[in-house]
Image: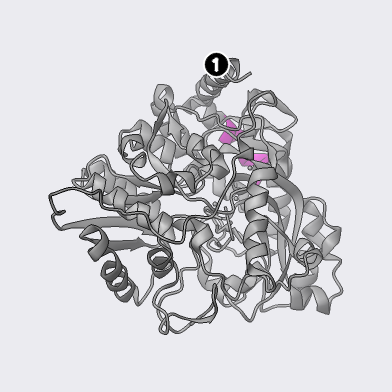
Amino acid sequence: MNRTKKKAKTLGVLSLGFTIALVGCGKQTDTTTTSATPAPKTTESAVQQTATPLAPVELTYYFPNSPQKDLQTVEDAVNKLIQPKINAKVHLKLIDWGAYEEKMKVTMASGEPYDLVWTAGNFNNYFQNVANGAYAPLEDLIVKYPAMKSGIPDMFWNAVKVKGHIYGVPVFQQSTAGYGYLIQKSVADKYKIDWKSVTKLSDLTPFLETVKKNEPNLIPWEYSQQIDPFLTAPPMFGMETLGDPKTPGNLYLKDGGKVVNQYETPEFKAYVTMMRDWYTKGYLKKDAATLKETSADRKAGKYALELGQIDSDSVAFAQAGMEASGRMSNFNPAIQSYDFQFVKPLLTTDKASATITAISANSPNKERAMMFLNLLNTDKEVYNTLVWGVDGKHYKKVADNRIETNKDGGYQIFAPWEFGNMTLSYLSEGDPKGNDTKFTQMWIDLNKNATPSNALGFVFDFTPVKAEKANTDAVIAELYYSLASGSIDPDKYLPQFLDKLKQAGSDKIIAEKQKQLDAWKATNK
């Protein structure tokens, strides 16, 4: 997920990245050895050599982020770059994080024609949307752009396949990540907090209590529907996701053969019990259960501690001779953090599919949409204009590949993980200072060298259980976040939640996952 910036820089991702994008069978071929080379600095020709000039087209591109006052300026700048290359103009349809998933459900259900859409395995239901026929198969178009294809490791392409077909272009980003937490440096230093001592989530309790007692202007712990530890970071609980993190049916990392209902595990009961304790003690916002995004509070530096999807932490950067201001500074340069990883990196299918750009099955301009995607993956100027805006207005260059953003410029999405190939991205003030090339290579190497999951490359096909998934989704929407935020008593409501899931068809989903996993393992020995 990812220079965690969205929800951090990991949908992808937590500071995500969590934000934001927050991950195979032991005998299978290890695809992680695929060389992840940076995208070329010069763009391959997006326009195939033909005798007939391309007719002008207009593309519609939906993606989520926080609202931006100067989006039109960025759209104009992107179009100025792409129009001479592919004779197209793109309309940037930025939707607020909290409204995005519902907006896209309505858009797809209505049959409204659009061209490009941001989606993910763990957000906006990429796999479910594929099952519903929302996205176009792309392999025939992808093969026309070898530089784009080769710039993304095979494992990422395999992670977005459904029944052998590719329905989206994965973003090559910091997908291989461990998990941990972020704590404001000023808080840790002031109270002499031993921030490196943490080995599990519950170890944060005394830190949160210190903040609650002594810092009335701070919220001890960040929580929202986009940043829920159990869904965002299954490896923290010894599990990995199959399909998407909400749907019943996970694997234990130590036993990659049996599919279990994650909500029936002792780990989930312990989690919701802990969260109930945290909530009643005032460590979370009162409206945590319904809170859909936290960017305003993060920009204001309101959270003392946050969940972190972390590739390299403060300790690793110090050992590499880099000065890191921490992931909290991605949202507010004045708020520095210590980032500590206590769950080691794991390479999972859901993280490789954590941020994807798909082309609508109803798009009237599928090939031109792919040409635009090719530019986002191979053209540094196009990519960075969409990610960072206009030089001199939204940021200023301070080195060849480093910028300082303008907080008053009207465009600060902090989302290089959301588009194209992240190896093209400028580094910003939130990134460690030192050897910029070495920093980028660190996360590329992590993607190649992390421990593979027990189901790396397995993609669950929801088609046989579409109705059951819709029914369990409704139950989860009704009760999950109230339980997971600690807003309601788990002794009373957890049994109700589990009973409703069974009535909705959770057992059938788990049986189908087991069936498909067994079949996949049989062909990947």
Q: Amino acid type of disc 1?
A: Ala
Please report the bounds of the magenta region as a residue range.
489-498
All told, the count of numbered labels is 1
Say left or right for 253 vs 124: right
- Would you place residue 314 above or below residue 476 in this image? below
Q: Nearer the viewer, residue 29 or 473?
A: 29
Q: Secondary structure at mark 1?
A: helix
Residue 181 found in image quarter: bottom right
Image spot of residue 204 (x, y percent) = 78, 59
The question of residue 492 being in magenta is answered with yes
Q: Residue at x 57, y 78 (%)?
A: 300
The question of residue 495 being in magenta is answered with yes
Which is the main secondary structure of the residues drawn in magenta? helix
Q: Residue at x 55, y 49 (%)?
A: 481
In this view of the protein, can residue 259 be seen by the observer?
yes
Image spot of residue 434 (x, y percent) = 70, 73
Say left or right for 438 vs 9: right
Say left or right for 421 vs 187: left
Structural crowding at the residue carrying mark 1, measured as other residues with C-alpha within 10 Å and reported as few (<14), some (14–19) or many (≥20): few
Q: Nearer the viewer, residue 169 or 477?
A: 169
Question: Mark 1 — residue?
Answer: 519
Say left or right for 288 vs 85: right
Image spot of residue 226 (x, y percent) = 53, 54
